[in-house]
Image (cartoon, rainbow, N blue to C red):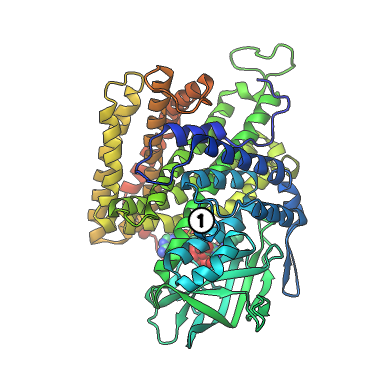
Amino acid sequence: MDNDNRAEYLAPQQDMRFLMDEMPGPVSTGDASIDNNDALFVLDMAAKFAQNELVPINAQCDKEGCTFDNGQVTLPKAMKAAFEQYANDGWMGLSMPEQWGGQALPEKLSTCVGEILTSANHTFSMTPALTMSACRAIISHGTAELKETYLKNMISGKWTGTMCLTESHCGSDLGLIRSKATEQGEHYKISGNKIFISSGKHDGSRNIIHLVLARLEGAPTGIKGLSLFLVPEKIENESAEWVKENGVHCIGIEEKMGMHGNPTCSMSFEASVGYLIGEQNKGINAMFTMMNEMRLGASLQGIGLSERSYQKAVNYAAERTQMRSLTGVKAKDKEADPLLVHPDVRRMLLTQKVLAEGGRALAQFCSDLLEKSHQDDCDKETIKLLDMLTPIAKGFCTETGLESASYAVQIHGGHGYIQETGAEQLYRDGRISTLYEGTTGIQALDLLGRKILGTQGKSLMSFTKLMHQLVKENSDSEPQKALLDVLAKYSKEWPDLTMKIGMKAMKNPDEAGAASFDYLMYSGYVSLAYFWAKMALVAQAILDGKREAKSDSMSTVFLEAKIKNAQFYFDRVLPRAEAHKLAMMAGANSMMDITDEQFLIQG
Ligand SMILES: Cc1cc2nc3c(=O)[nH]c(=O)nc-3n(C[C@H](O)[C@H](O)[C@H](O)COP(=O)(O)OP(=O)(O)OC[C@H]3O[C@@H](n4cnc5c(N)ncnc54)[C@H](O)[C@@H]3O)c2cc1C
């Protein structure tokens, strides 16, 4: 391999085009189509922005960090400049409606751009993602007046958004929220303290629009008593200028493990003017619009992390020489062979690669469903399928993203543990993705409890039906027969296991909790098996001339690698589903029988 001049990161445009152009989506998304050349152009511009502007400032922003001084938060200089450029170039509203200044491009494309941003600079991607998710909640649940007043400024990037859920005593359990709201004529007064608010205060935006969950006086306790409010940092004064303070204060920022270029703020709302989004006491429904978008966004952080970790590690493995290949000297002109010859290094690299590309296929599939879900005529099955795949995408892709980042450190050896190579920053920055937007444990409970058992398995059946169809429609595909046989087995096994867990959970709810994490991971591995089989079939059909590639960028090397990578996935990664199966079917007893006293033995 010629390793001269290999870039630190190149957006995986060929793979993205393969998914967008060659892999048929799950649903018809009507008008949201884009001309191939337009898509190519947008993807290329996004790649250039990420490669030229975001990659070079990643380490610098990590070192510089954000600073807090007397209520003001200063971003690293380069971060502020990059955000300004991003907003001025019109990237914020890529898939937002044109009515408010967006470009109404398909979700598929903005999913690709989202991944590229997070791969290039995880920290940078935070503010745009939060702002656009806040816009989605306003579009879906806000009044016409709120839309008119806020969307254009947010979509242009003049104002940015936040999601204010967490309080010091409540994270996963939002039902405990204590922030209060009092009705005052046409608006509300919001009071309370929130912690860990990403982009809660910074100097990259003229106004910050907070979406705050709070409880109206006299509202029921728990999650059913929460309402969602739009609370601007600044409101209009008598001269219609947006400069009047609204009692929103940042009282500090966190020192943290990674993501130093994005401020994590403690916020205080002191009788701040707020506007209701959606209905009173139904705030959680409105907030879920934002949270679900953010969960899919977090899945892109996991996928982007796997991709970036692979690229970083493979470049290093091609260059660094240590020991000789087990089968004899490969690089005769060198005193040792490149790391790339060693099977164990190849295992780690290929694992990163199949997790990135498999995750990307899942994300593209979800983005098609998301596109459809924004349309008025969306059917319930599409919504249920998207609801089910969201916790899988979020939980599985972030867990496996971290695994990939850990391999990036491992492949760099001791050099991965020191700052200079940048591998450790990938891990530090990425570590948050399994925690925020609902921890993996919460995604797992949501998947098994609400999304699967709560729909009597209907959402699952819509997906296993697709698996079954793929197997049936390709029964004559000799090269992929072995993969399809395995897929057929899982399409039957997954619902069977679910039913068994459901039966046990009816007698003892702890059975669902005890199975949930392994169930999530099992579901992730099996879902990716579907996408890998499908990708292999499409690549094979193009190579065999049975199907004409829509895009001329599909090289033979790329297509052949797809098929080999699918084989690696089935041989070396999918078997992990078996271990998760055994663990999730083992029941709750071995964890629930331990007494508190036994847990707390010390010394
Ligand atoms: C850098 C950063 C940025 C953030 N950004 C935002 C933001 O912009 N807006 C915002 O509102 N919040 C934000 N958060 C908060 C984040 O969403 C929460 O930290 C997260 O939801 C977990 O809540 P917690 O920290 O209180 O943990 P806890 O809820 O206390 O959970 C602790 C552990 O217990 C597990 N657990 C809890 N309940 C259960 C259960 N019923 N079953 C099984 N396991 C359970 C969890 O999975 C976790 O492993 C951010 C946090 C950080 C660190």
Asked whether residue 206 appears in the rendered view, the answer is yes
The quarter in which the N terminus is drawn is top right
**Relative depth, front residue between 447 and 125:** 125
Instruction: Indicate whether 424 appears above or below 453.
Output: above
**Relative depth, front residue between 130 and 172:** 130
Q: Residue at x 56, y 24 (%)?
A: 343
Horizontal and vertical percent position of residue 438: 47, 59
The quarter in which the C terminus is drawn is bottom right
Horizontal relation, residue 376 to residue 152: left or right: left
Q: Residue at x 69, y 33 (%)?
A: 7
Which residue matches tag 1? 98
Q: Quadrant of residue 537?
A: top left
Q: Amino acid at mark 1?
A: Glu
Horizontal relation, residue 131 to residue 286: left or right: right
Instruction: Indicate whether 383 appears above or below 488.
Output: below
Horizontal and vertical percent position of residue 320: 70, 26
Q: Quadrant of residue 306?
A: top right
Horizontal and vertical percent position of residue 266: 63, 71
Q: Residue at x 48, y 32 (%)?
A: 18
Q: Residue at x 43, y 19 (%)?
A: 543
Asked whether residue 402 appears in the rendered view, the answer is no
Instruction: Indicate whether 397 appears above or below 221.
Output: above
